[in-house]
Image (tube, rainbow, N blue to C red):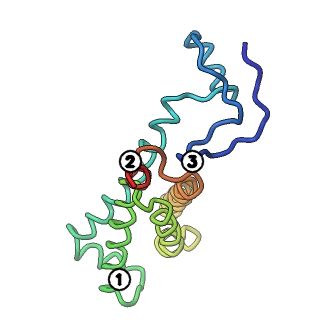
Amino acid sequence: MATPVSEPVAANEAGRFAPHGDIAPTTRSASSSLWDFLSGVRYSEALERYGTLVARILLSQIFLLSGVMKIVDWSGTEAQMAGRSMFWIPFFHVAAMLVELGAGLSILLGYKARLGALILFLFLIPVTLTFHNFWTYTDPKEQQVNMLFFMHNLTLMGGLLLIMIVGPGRFSLDLWRRSSA
């Protein structure tokens, strides 16, 4: 059985995280490999290779869909904004749509993904405080629903923070452009 690696983890040139002194791949049983992965002894090559791509695809979908829905249901979006006593509704409607679509595509494609994640992170702060201020509701059901949406947005912010830290990963336009230059 492999001994745990206690050295710090660092990113290499490709933005991949791996322990210093990687353990060479060997033939191992599935249960042994799973245990090593879960205990932090080894990492999964497939997870390292495709994990950031899958994470970017999953995380970007909510922003892309929300941006498209702001186009599809234009009047409904503006009515929801008016219900929150927002001002400059046409401006903020178009700005929100452009931020969600532009930064969502940035994350999906891995093109300036760290910048896209930062923009969405900052965008979510006022959105969360304006649209999901659960503490202002008196009805317990509405309070609970909005608290869940509030927590949902905090979770999205955590995923965006990870993209800012780790970067877009191996399968990204940023890395493709660097390798072709």
User: Label 1 near label 3: C-beta < 8 Å?
Assistant: no
Quarter of the picture containing the C terminus is bottom left
Between residue 81 and residue 51, name the one nearer to us: 51
Q: Residue at x 48, y 58 (%)?
A: 145
Disc marking residue 57: 2
Q: Residue at x 26, y 73 (%)?
A: 76
> What residue is disc 1 on?
82
Disc on the earlier residue, 1 or 2: 2
> What residue is disc 3 on?
13
- Relative image position of residue 25 (x, y in whole percent): 59, 19
Mark 3, mark 2: which one is toward the viewer?
Answer: 3
Residue 133 located left or right of residue 41: left
Camera sees residue 88 = yes
Disc on the earlier residue, 3 or 1: 3
Q: Check disc 3 and give the amino acid type.
A: Glu
Q: Check disc 2 and give the amino acid type.
A: Ile
